[in-house]
Image (cartoon, helix red, strand yellow):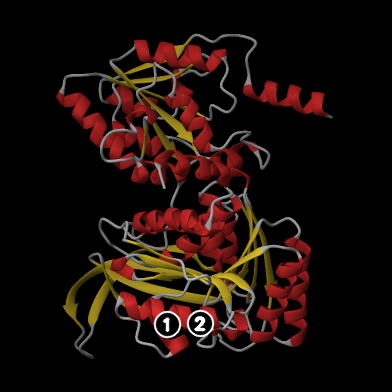
Amino acid sequence: MDYSTSLSLMDGFHAGHVLVLGDVMLDRFVYGTVQRISPEAPIPVVAVERSADMPGGAANVARNIAALGARATLIGVCGEDAPAGALRAQLAASPTIEVCLIVDASRPTSLKIRYVADGQQVMRADRESRDPLSAALEAAVLSAFDAALMHADVVVLSDYAKGVLSPSLTRAVINSAIRSSKRVIVDPKAKDFERYRGATILTPNRQELQLATGHDCAAQPELVIAARTLLAEGICEFLLVTRGKDGMSIIAADGATVHQPTAARQVFDVSGAGDTVVATLALGLAAGGDVAQAAALANHAAGIVVAKRGTATVTTGEMIAALAPADGSADAYKIFSLDSVLRLARAWREQGLKIAFTNGCFDLLHPGHVSLLDQARRTADRLIVGLNADLSIRRLKGPKRPVQSEVARATVLAAIKSVDAVVIFAENTPIQLIESLEPDVLVKGADYTVSTVVGADLVLRRGGRVVLADLVHGHSTTATVERVAAAVS
């Protein structure tokens, strides 16, 4: 799949809506150091320094969907406990996730605690129940699913074998999806794949496929034989088998097979990588891609996320940079990840060039934006523009913004002559970008004051300048959106 097609599909993520049903959990990472072995047993003593909570399981699938600029409806079951409150708080940070967590006071919220010392995971402790749901709870989950189904483009069933996706509920939701002509992606954990009959795609890893079929899946040819055996039973239309360092394989019911080598350059943590795969796969299909195209995007997303620590997510900005051809033919796009723009900035500085930085949403680019960018470029030799991701705009401006996806906005910005590089950031403010880039000049519009410009103190402290660009009056994205909405209504 060429770079332009990849960009086109990622542009479609913005309009996607995925219904995620499955086992939600809270992933807790406890970080510290090990300097001695316990005198009580031959185990390391972890001196705890900090901890971090992240949504896990089906909740992490939804979080990945939101990070890629799309909408998700998340349905799951949690307990009535502190981990449930922490999970809800984490999900609340993503305004494009509609959360429907049905409470079962008799069971704990699934909690995975990973102890990480000096960059290595030394232990994991799980608190969970694998008991099946009661008939009443199962009926409540099915009712919530059916109510949300009409708004979804694709359905993801995230099965971590914690009791939510019983054989009866799984069959019921897949049948509902089939009646509504919705494609279903299943991340399976059950040994018997019969419960997933009717799904569009199953995404087992190599070991899960081996357990389900009884075939040795160590080598690629044997894996294909095992997959075709399963497909011959009519369980699903496609199998996407993840093969770790060897990449992934897509095998279709009609016999077509595609093997994709791994896109990972380095691996720090595989926690949640499967969630990233199914989230990206779902959005690729929702955007109009075929299974091979959606899988190619998912493969690149997985390659990015395993290079991060913890249960992480991927942004379209990171994917654009990762997908850019190595031969330089994509330079005209001028869209970079943080790592790649930092390398670019270092190269410019080695040439003695000064760097200016400005940021914004740049939704519906207008003459005021163009004037700001031109003025910013005149303050230095190169201009880097920080662009708010869709997720951060929705946090700041509400669920109806932005009008254009981050891919579309970045592409338009990159086409402007005065812009030398665009980097998308998911945080509410560009402070981390400014800290990393250390621009010589920081530029914002004159509707700000120096004291209200984010990062101004950092730039001034390093001897840089803060410039307030003249405004072009009569141009406002919000006002334009309001005028268009009024005209349509």
* Label pair 2/1, CB-CB below 8 angstroms: yes
The image shows residue 360 at horizontal and vertical percentages of 50, 28
Residue at x 57%, y 55% (from the top left corner): 285
Quadrant for the C terminus, please: top right
The relative height of residue 396 versus residue 262 in the rendered view (above or below) is above
The relative height of residue 159 versus residue 272 in the rendered view (above or below) is below
User: On the image, numbered disc 2 is attached to which residue?
Assistant: 230
The image shows residue 340 at horizontal and vertical percentages of 29, 39
- In depth, the one of 236 and 340 nearer the eye is 236
- 335 sits left or right of 128 in the view: left
Indicate the quadrant where residue 145 lies: bottom right
Q: Amino acid at mark 2?
A: Leu
The relative height of residue 97 versus residue 215 in the rendered view (above or below) is above
Residue at x 44%, y 16% (from the top left corner): 373
The image shows residue 251 at horizontal and vertical percentages of 46, 69
Q: Is residue 489 visible?
A: yes
Q: Residues within 10 Å of mark 2 (few under 14, many from 20)?
A: many
Indicate the quadrant where residue 42 lies: bottom left
Local secondary structure at mark 1: helix
Indicate the quadrant where residue 185 lies: bottom right
- In depth, the one of 76 and 169 nearer the eye is 169
- 341 sits left or right of 143 in the view: left
In the rendered structure, find residue 191 and report the number of the disc placed on it.
none
- In depth, the one of 244 and 220 nearer the eye is 220
Residue at x 28%, y 62% (from the top left corner): 268
Residue at x 34%, y 46% (from the top left corner): 322
Local secondary structure at mark 2: helix
Outermost residue to the right: 489
- 413 sits left or right of 124 in the view: right
Q: Residues within 10 Å of mark 1 (few under 14, many from 20)?
A: some
User: On the image, numbered disc 1 is attached to which residue?
Assistant: 226
The image shows residue 405 at horizontal and vertical percentages of 56, 37
